[in-house]
Structure formats: structure tokens, C-alpha cells
Amino acid sequence: MPAVRIETASDNLSLSTLAVGTFLCFASLYLVSLIVYRLWLHPLAKFPGPLLAKLTSWYDVYHAYKGDKHLHFHYLHEKYGTLVRYAPNTLSINDPQALKAIYGHKANVRKSDFYLAFPAAPGVFSTHTALDRHQHARKRRVMSHAFSDSALKGVEDFVLVHIQEYIERLTTKSSNRHGPSLSSEKIGWTDGKDLSKWSSYLGFDVMGDLSFGKSFGMLGNHPENREACFLLEQAARRHNIVRPMPFLHRSGIDKILFRKIYNDRKAYLTFSRKQVSERTNSDVLKSERKDFFYYLLRSKDPETGEGFSMRELWGESNTLIIAGSDTTSTTLTATLFYLLHDASVLSRLNAEIRSTFDSVEEIRSGPKLNGCTYLRACIDEAMRMSPPVGAILPRTVLPGGLEVLGHKLPAGTGVGSPIYALHHHAAYVPNSFIYNPSRWLADEPGTTPESLEALHSVFNPFSIGPRGCIGKPMAYLELSLALARLVWAFDMRLAPGKEGRVGEGRKGLGYGREREHEFQLEDIFVSEKKGPIAEFRPRS
């Protein structure tokens, strides 16, 4: 009679142990192989960078979550040099020649998969999120109608309505700023106003009016809509975090790891979708009011004859709100921050604006405003010091490779130039952490054709090339009108005490955040900001 084999618990345990051991063995082998490949065999192995960054993209995710990527890129290039490997398959190159090679018209690159995390709905791509260059070119040709000189001239009156309300909100005195109890230093001045908040409300109201045919009312009668500013920041923060590891977006893991941020993003998209729905179902749609939405709805690609579908309209309107509100408000706030921290610069700007225009109503687009060269220098210097988008706009090398600074990068390599680090490159911008609008003016002592050429070679707050910001003229128009009208009519100063320090750097805040007279931004792809808090009074 044959022997009967009886399985015991110890046999099952041995099989389980064997299975676990086998799995751990293969996992360890894979991990070791991956480490060996990324450190010694990878095409980017020769480039310097932090050890952890060479091994895993979680290094990049960490700094995105921390909100200091713009500062960290500056630190990395100060430590490692011009070319830095900051992720397993990605290079940051801090050089103006690289800027042209990566973002110029002939660059053999496409936008990286980072932008796949941006679509408001599956299959909906905008000029901002389209990876394919032909798809982007079609969309940009349609969008160009909304940003032509004649179109911008047509929307100027809409913009001025909101600028006037912005100035009124900043300069209105509270009820407790009157009477004999006030000290002589406070008589005539408003209470402190947080310029980050009010500038954000202005940006949203302007772009809401131009994109959806109605203001969001954040400056005025709809303060409940102000939450959208926060929700937009959260949406941008979420995109910035999942960018280094697209699988976080594709797999939906971000819904678990970053639940609060993910839900805030959903709330913002719901808000945005509602605005488009209301616009497309309103009587405004039938009117001849020539705002951005008018052109987006009616314009056709001159090459294909195609316009935008309704889903594309939503995507483009959503892009306009992000690009036109947050980035412009950051520059407006930064410019005011630096003016408030430098009395001589503010005094010179006051003199230029007040001697050029006889009344605030005269301040409109045209030769006089264009002739305010110091105003433009103040704006450009603020964008150089504190660019609204300060890190990298990532690109992926296409088949055929890309040569940058003598290095041939293979297809599939991630690459980009860090905007904040370039703007503070000491070889091209002397005393780069000092706010000095005069460096932009050709007739200033110490300015040479060579220094101006070097300065412009690294200046790229709107990016460059075929993907450069199409709304650049609109941004300069809004910024110039708002600043000129505010400066013409009112004096301004920092609020006293601790309030006046909001937005400044200070000791103990970490790398790049200890410079007192540098406006502090949190990098969330765009920028999150606080302060400065300022007081106003009618000009003396």
C-alpha cells in the first residue's frame, strides 16, 4: 500500500516563505539593477546632481510639494554648475544659449507629459496643454484673433472699469480712520490693504469679464466668489506635484495621497465649467460685445477653416483665467512690493507718471503710456526678480536628439531652463538680487549695449519661441494701466509694524528666503503669495 503524504501547516509555511523570499530576491535584484543603471549606465549618468535626484523622481515631487522649486534650481546650479541632473531622466540647463536651443522655433522638442495632468476633461487640450506642435499651432492661430492689436484696443474699456474699482478698494478709508484720536502720522491714510489678495481679485474680475462676459465680482458685490482664487492655486499645486511622476495622475493615486488638493481642484473645475455654461447660454453670446470669448467663438483657423468646439472653448477659457489672472496679479503685486521697499524708485516713477499725464482719465494705451520707459523698467525688473512662473517649463527631446552646449541629448530626455535661476545668473545680471529698474534703460550711467544684451538674453518670464505666452501684450497693458493710474492719483507706503513685513524674506526661512527686500513666492507652477500690506492717501 503506497504511503500517503499529509500536508502540514509547516509545509504551507515553507511554501509561503519560499514565495516571499523569491519575490524579495527579484525585487532586490531589480532595485540594484535600477540603481546601477541610473548611476552608471544611463545616458545622463555623466551629469552632476543630487544622488537622490538621480535615483528617483520623488526628489522632484518633494520640492514641488514644498513649494520651493524655483529657489532649489538656483541652489542646484550654484552648487553643480550649468547642467544639473535633477531627476533620473531630466536635465536643468542654466544658460541663455540653452534657453534658445530648448524653447526656440527650431528646437527638436515637444511639451513633456507634465501637461497631460492639466486637461480640464479627458481629451480636451488647450494652447497650454497640447503636446502635438501641429495641434498647438492650429489653436494658436485661432487664439491670435483675440490678442490682435485691434482686439486689445477693443477690450481696454472693460479692463479700465475693473482697474478703477481696484484702485477704489485699495484707497477707501475705513470708518475708524477719522477723528481726533488718530495720530498725525495716520491722518489721511487708509488702513492696511493686502495687495496680493486685491490684485488677485482684479486679475480674476478682468479675465472673467473678457472670457465669460461677466465679472466674477470679487472686487465688489460677489465676495463669495473669492474662494476661486484659493481653488485655482490648489489646482495648480496639484498639477505641479504630479508633474514629475505622471503615473500619479494616470493611476489616480494622487486622489489618495493628496486628497484635499485633488478635491479643491475638482471644485475649481466645476466653478470654471459653470462659467462657460452660463456664458454659452446667455444673451451675451448673441451680442456683438467683442471680448475674448467673442473671438474664440467666431474665429477660424485661416489654414484649415476650423474653429473651436464647445469643449475646446471651455479648455481655452480655463487657460485664459489661469494665465491672465494669477500670473498678472503676481507681477502687479511684486512691482508694488519693490516700489514700496525703495523710496527713490517710487519717487522717480511718481515723477514720470505725474509729469506725463494731466489727469487719471488720460492714462490709456497710446504713445504717452508707451513713452513711460521707467514704468516699463519697473515692471520688467519686478518680473526678473520674482517671475510668476519661476521653475522649469519641461520639454521632451524628440527622435533625432537635441544638441545643447555641445552635448547630444537622446530622444526621450527631459530638459528645460529654470526661469528664476536664469534671471539671477550673476554672469549676465550683476547684483542680481537688487531691484534696479535703471539696468533696463540704455541711457543710464553704467548701462552698456553689452549689459542690455546680456540682460535680455536671460529674461524670459513669458517664455520664448512658438510656445511663448500669447497674452504678453495684454499683460503689459493691464499692468501699465493699473500701476500708472494708481501712482498718478495716490501716495503709498508700507503698513507700520509687523504688517509692513509681510511678503519679505527673513532669517531662518531657508535657502533663498532670507533676503529682506525680495518678494517671497511659493512655487506651485504659478505662484502663491502674501502681502505686501500697504496704506494709501490722495497724492500730496
Image (cartoon, grey):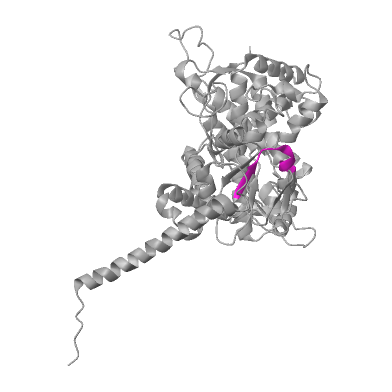
- The residue under the point 65% across, 21% down is 487
- The residue under the point 75% across, 46% down is 104
Residue stretch in magenta: 90-100
Label tally = 0
Above or below, 534 against 96 in this view is above
Left or right: 51 with respect to 441? left
**Percent x, y for residue 7?**
21, 78
Above or below, 477 against 192 in this view is below
**Percent x, y for residue 142?**
73, 54
Question: Nearest the camera: 75 or 165?
Answer: 75
**Percent x, y for residue 265?**
48, 49
**Percent x, y for residue 403?**
74, 49
Please identify the quarter of the rendering in which residue 1 is found.
Answer: bottom left
Do we see residue 528 in this rendering? yes
Question: Nearest the camera: 531 or 69?
Answer: 69
Do we see residue 279 in this rendering? no
